Amino acid sequence: MKTVLGAIRRADEDFNMIQRGDRIAVGVSGGKDSLLLLYALSLYRNFPGRDFSLVALTLDMGRKPFDTAPVQELCDKLGVEYHVKESEIAHIIFDIRKEKNPCALCAKMRRGVLSDMAKEYGCNKLAFAHSREDALETLMMSLIFEARLYTFNPVTYWSRSDLTVIRPMIYLPEKHIIHVVKEYELPVVKNPCPANGNTKRQEMKELMKEMTSRYPQFKDYMLRALQDDEGYGLWFKPKKQGAETADGETP
């Protein structure tokens, strides 16, 4: 957990993610990444000078079985407020629209509902559990499928909902997430999505695994390119406390 908190602290300091008095909504899907983010932020809020509050939010996509009781138990243990919202997003995407590539639309719909929930419960920030690999995979997908260089920013201001989205685990490798989640026995909820494991992102995971086997520093160099301090990277580091970035995402 020391490594996890160190990565979060580095991201916080690099991008001015968290300020005193913030009320942060954590998007908790029930997967390993979001559970670790929730657990780690519950510890990080006790660091000197942090003093922020947390609310855990889960969006039920409408596919069963999806049991949130273990997440509720974890939130009770951590002393974190927890809310679940039912939706028919899965029904719309898979049954009505019959999307062949559902991930982009699903993500957009989920972001919209979570932003509404965050505002409903008085939050000014929304935290997502994207890891280092998530950022690099998004960069690879944008290059291969969209002919552009793009990935999400560690800090993003959503003007339409007046929310700041933060990604505190942006420096954390996925392999470390897997290790810590097992060590702390966090209650991972099985993903009922029909497309789970059969997506373009999964293709990028396999491609990056192959590239890393050939070039061991591949991921480190990609990450370094994103945060280039000379101004050529895709990530902008604010120079003053409270500064925010915008990357064009719309909830």
Image (cartoon, grey):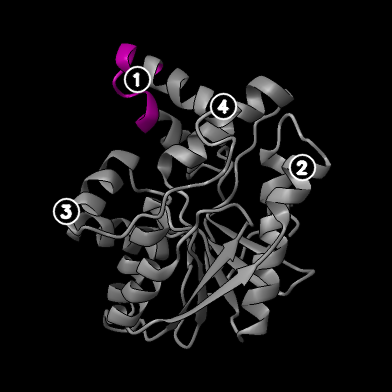
Instruction: Say how many tags the image has.
Output: 4
Q: Residue furthest front?
A: 65
- Residue named by callout 4: 140
- Nearest the camera: 99 or 38? 99
Q: Left or right? Give the position of 237 relative to 7.
A: right
Identify which amino acid the numbered label 4 is placed on: Met
Of labels 3 and 2, earlier in sequence is 2
Residue at 76% of width from left, 68% of height from top?
159
Residue at 75% of width from left, 72% of height from top?
161
**Is label 3 in contact with label 1 (beta carbons under 8 Å)?**
no
Of labels 2 and 4, earlier in sequence is 2
Of labels 3 and 1, earlier in sequence is 3
In reply to whether residue 219 is colored magenta, the answer given is yes
- Residue named by callout 2: 95
Identify which amino acid the numbered label 2 is placed on: Asp
Identify which amino acid the numbered label 1 is placed on: Thr
- Residue named by callout 1: 212
Position in image of residue 211 (x %, y %): 40, 16
Task: Determine the secondary structure under disc 4.
Answer: helix
Task: Determine the secondary structure under disc 3.
Answer: helix
Residue at 28% of width from left, 44% of height from top?
178
Give the CA separation, mark 3 to mark 2: 38 Å
Which tag is nearer the camera, tag 3 or tag 1?
3
- Residue named by callout 3: 183
Of labels 4 and 1, earlier in sequence is 4
Identify which amino acid the numbered label 3 is placed on: Glu
**Is label 2 in contact with label 4 (beta carbons under 8 Å)?**
no
Q: Is residue 199 above or below residue 194?
A: above
Give the CA separation, mark 4 to mark 3: 31 Å
Region in magenta: 211-220
- Nearest the camera: 246 or 136? 136
